[in-house]
Image (spheres, rainbow, N blue to C red):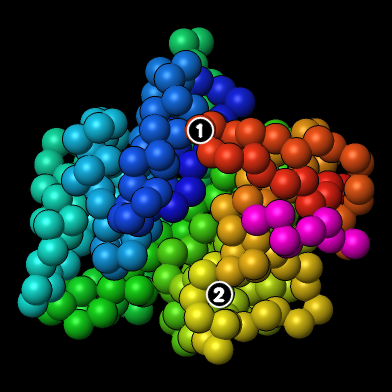
Amino acid sequence: MFYIKHDTDNFTIIDCQLFGEHKEWLVDELIQESKEKSITRFISTHPDEDHLQGIEHLDKRMPISNFYVVKNDAHKPDETVSFKHYCKLRDGDKAFYVHKGCTRKWINQGDEERAASGISFLWPDLKNEDFQEALRASTDGKEFNNTSLVARYSIKGGPSFLWLGDLETPFMEKIFDHIELPETTIVFAPHHGRDSGKLPNKWLEKLNPKIIVIGEAPSRHLNYYSGYKKITQNKAGDITFIPDGRKVHCYASLESYGKKDWLTDEDKPNENFGVRDLDYYIGTLNF
């Protein structure tokens, strides 16, 4: 689960997995951090349970009025409460169906009333045969990873960030010639950093990321992207990035993660973000 507190009048949530002890405090934080924003949206990368768990709870406490999703007809043999609620949002009047190059106020089009959020969608290409095959597999309830969208957040004169859901390596190889991949400062590794979702080398050459964030999959399944700087969520816990011009100040929720020698130590204090306990400064990316 991610959220972006934009430098414009926008607030974005990407995916959710709400359960256990953090179910309430995390929604408390989302409510607190978004309270001064007029536009709040939820972006669903794809309909896997670990990307939508607890969405009914989020919608109850923090009503979702803008639901960004890839148009699909995914079915599952055993439908959870969260998946049923996802389908209700997906098929309802709050849904906006995203695709490569789509535009909408105020996600990527600003006006005199409000500036845009800076988010663009690089994928899916609705006419792409490999994507259409992935959609058919999701309709048949077989597999959902390769219906994932690709979203990029870019700050003018500052860093950029990329989300790829759970795209799998063979699929990314197939669509390489059909997707634009601008250089991006921080990339969240697809499929939680699993080897099965390892970004192909030709993707990495295009993206040229300064940091790759590797998710919370079991370590035996992870690809550690040799030759690239990375933050591993298994060890860092919750991660916070604070853009500051051509810098990004980086924080982790686990003190044991420590400062990283490949980041510049600008002696920033540890901080409280939202309603969480103290987050620990691990260094600053200069790019």
Q: Nearer the viewer, mark 1 or mark 2?
A: 1
**Drawn side of residue 178 relative to residue 54, left or right:** right
Kindly identify the amino acid type of the residue bearing the numbered disc 1.
Val
Q: Is residue 203 magenta?
A: no
Mark nearer the N terminus (1 vs 2): 2
- Quarter assignment of residue 24: top left
Label 2 SS? helix
Report the residue at 57% width, 82% height from top: 219
Q: Please state which of residues 266 and 178 is positioned toward the viewer in this rendering.
A: 266
How much space separates mark 1 and mark 2, taking CA atoms? Answer: 27 Å
Mark 2 and mark 1 in contact (Cβ < 8 Å)?
no
Residue 218 location (% of width, % of height): 50, 81
Residue picked out by circle 1: 275
Look at the magenta stretch and give its main secondary structure: loop
Q: Is residue 99 visible?
A: no
Q: Position of residue 260 (x, y in %)?
A: 84, 60
Q: Which residues, given as a range, are shown in magenta?
A: 254-261
Vertical order, 16 against 141 (above or below) = above
Q: Which residue is mark 2?
A: 193
Residue 77 marker: none
Q: Secondary structure at mark 1?
A: loop
The quarter of the displayed image where residue 246 is located:
top right
Residue at figure coordinates x 34%, y 47% from the top left: 23
Q: Nearer the viewer, residue 25 or 8?
A: 25
